[in-house]
Image (spheres, grey):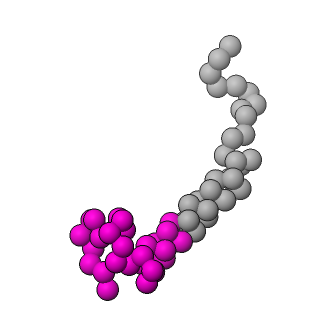
Amino acid sequence: MFGMRKWSTPVLRPAAPFIAGGLAVFYLVAKAQDAMINSDEYKNDPRNPALASGKKAH
């Protein structure tokens, strides 16, 4: 009854656009966060997580 069937349900092909969209959003959000952390306004802020990890401000 369970296990491999004659007609398996497609999972990867219908989900591929959503996976690609999720990866693109993840990349763009990470890039935006990095740009905001390194901006002049927050570069020397003590709440900046980059300063807590030992990264020097330029």
Residue 24, placed above or below residue 8: below
Which residue shows up at 37% across the image and 68% down it? 48
Q: Is residue 34 visible?
A: yes
Which quarter of the picture shows residue 5?
top right
In the foreground, 21 or 9: 21
Q: Position of residue 16 (x, y in %)?
A: 68, 53
x 57%, y 68%: residue? 28
Give whichever of 55, 19 is nearer the camera: 55
Observer able to see residue 50: no
Q: Is residue 29 or residue 38 the one in the foreground? A: 38
Note whether 4 is above or below 24 in the view shown.
Answer: above
Which range is magenta?
A: 30-58
Instruction: Give the residue at x 72% y 40%.
Output: 10
As drawn, is 23 to the left or to the right of 47?
right
Residue at the spot x=61%, y=62% of the render?
A: 25
Q: Quadrant of the N terminus?
A: top right
Q: Please, which residue is most extreme toward the top here?
A: 1
**4 is within the stretch colored magenta:** no
Q: Is residue 57 magenta?
A: yes
